[in-house]
Image: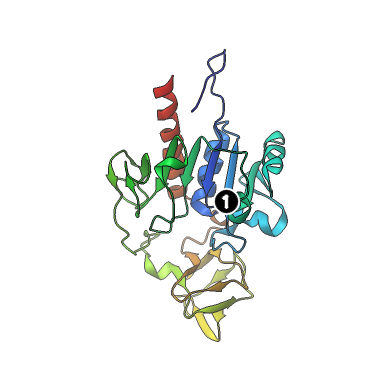
Amino acid sequence: MIEKNDNHSLVSPFILIKGAGEMASAIAWRLYQANMRHICMLDLEKALAVRRQVSFCTVFEDTETSVEGVPAISVKDGDGIDAAWNKSKIAVTLTTDWDLIEDHRPDVVIDAILAKRNTGTALADAPLVIALGPGFEAGADCHLLIETNRGHNLGRIIENGAATANTGIPGAISGHTAQRVLRAPAAGTFKTDRVIGDLVKAGDVVGQVEGNPLVAEIDGILRGLIKPGTVIPRGLKIGDIDPRGDAQYCDTISDKARAIGGSVLEAIMRQYNKAA
């Protein structure tokens, strides 16, 4: 799968990442920084990312984007993928367009959708299949599984078995857990005049869905907010309030995402060392 050239240096494998939201983007960023530059990411045209300023899926809005200095470009076919790589950019394509591309087969598939269930990833997808979080079983659905639950085992690489079941409770930031997450009060179209980086107070109306107000429960900064105009189901996470109030956190990869990105890099390197 991963080969070495005559100088015994790593030849970048073709890495396909399912998802282009916060966690998927942190993984792509880490692999890119490790000189694994043959990366293609997949996402929906109307992606549901909340931390959009650190998510490569925003490329569908502007054609090009970057996360902490790493560039990405939207593409529609195999030639576009090759052109992106030739420019040292991450390729991002719609899942529907990828389904039509037949001449690019990945060496590594990473399921970073974080749907809390397996939406179609299988061992046969690539020589190395890595998945994130609950909903998968290493050895059955994927070769390696990454623990995503905050705590002692965050980032642990699982070779056999499942990750921790979904707790439904967000990780604490400055002592706040569920209160810092904004969830859709109803099904429908999300509307707001707020933007990521705005300061809010407990009780402020952050937006509305079909006339139902979305109310902040704590003081802080809007670290993430789903794209206005997105049609969403009731209860979906659509915003993230950071009680620390530091604006730089809006534009940088989180500690959790950075840790998970490092674990995925290690998982790929384990495979390389086995083949060496």
In this rendering, is residue 262 above or below 113?
above
180 or 137, which is in the foreground?
A: 137
Answer left or right for 97 relative to 242: right
Q: From the viewer's perspective, tell me whether residue 140 is left or right of residue 221.
A: left
**Observer-nearest residue: 80 or 247?**
80
**Front position in the image: 72 or 12:** 12
Q: Which residue is drawn at 56% across and 66% down?
A: 225
The kind of residue tagged 1 is Leu
Give the answer, above or below, for where 204 lies relative to 244: below
Q: Where does the image place residue 46, in percent across and percent down from the top left? A: 60, 64
At which x and y percent is residue 265?
46, 35
Residue extending furthest toward the left: 161
Residue reaching furthest to the bottom: 211
The percent position of residue 236, horizontal first and vertical second, equals: 46, 70
Residue at 43 percent across and 44 percent down: it is: 260
Q: How is the image coloured?
A: rainbow
Residue 253 shows in this picture: no
